[in-house]
Amino acid sequence: MSFFEELPPLIPVRQLAELTGMHEVTLRKGLREGRIPGDKVDGMWFAFRDLVFPRAKEAFGDGEK
């Protein structure tokens, strides 16, 4: 299993901040404004892994070419 496959399909803001080095507040603002693809579930924001990192699957050898 690759690094990409180990990521959950919905990435919590805290984990996304760790992966990208961006501040959680900035990420939440981007999610709220629709600049980062994601959704709010039970009051918590999550980013859609496959849309935030569209080329990662291929880069890690998991995607179809």
Image (spheres, rainbow, N blue to C red):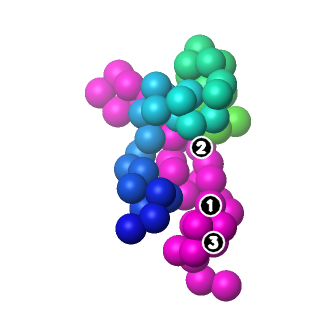
Q: Which residue is mark 2?
A: 37
Name the kind of residue labelled 3 in the image.
Glu
| Secondary structure at numbered mark 1 | helix
Pointer 1 or 2: first along the chain = 2
Instruction: Reply yes or no: does residue 52 show up in magenta.
Output: yes
- Placement of the C terminus among the 4 image quadrants: bottom right
Q: How many tags in the picture? A: 3
Q: Is residue 5 left or right of residue 31?
A: left
Q: Residue at x 41, y 45 (%)?
A: 10
User: Which quarter of the picture shows residue 54?
Assistant: bottom right
Q: Position of residue 63 (x, y in %)?
A: 57, 76
Q: CA distance from mark 2 to mark 3?
A: 19 Å
Q: Which residue is mark 1?
A: 56
Q: Judge whether 5 appears above or below 14 on screen.
A: below
Q: Position of residue 49 (x, y in %)?
A: 51, 51
Q: Residues within 10 Å of mark 1 (few under 14, many from 20)?
A: some
Q: CA distance from mark 1 to mark 2?
A: 15 Å
Q: Which residue is mark 3?
A: 58
Name the kind of residue labelled 2 in the image.
Pro
User: Which is more toward the observer, 23 or 3?
Assistant: 3
Q: Position of residue 33 (x, y in %)?
A: 66, 27
Q: Are marks 3 and 1 in contact (CB under 8 Å)?
A: yes
Q: CA distance from mark 3 to mark 1?
A: 5 Å
Mark 1 against mark 2, which lies toward the viewer?
A: 1
User: Which quarter of the picture shows residue 17?
Assistant: top right
Region of the chain picked out in magenta, as a range: 37-65
Q: Residue at x 35, y 22 (%)?
A: 43
Q: Residues within 10 Å of mark 3 (few under 14, many from 20)?
A: few
Q: Is residue 44 left or right of residue 29?
A: left
Q: Residue at x 46, y 25 (%)?
A: 14
User: Which is more toward the observer, 57 or 27?
Assistant: 57
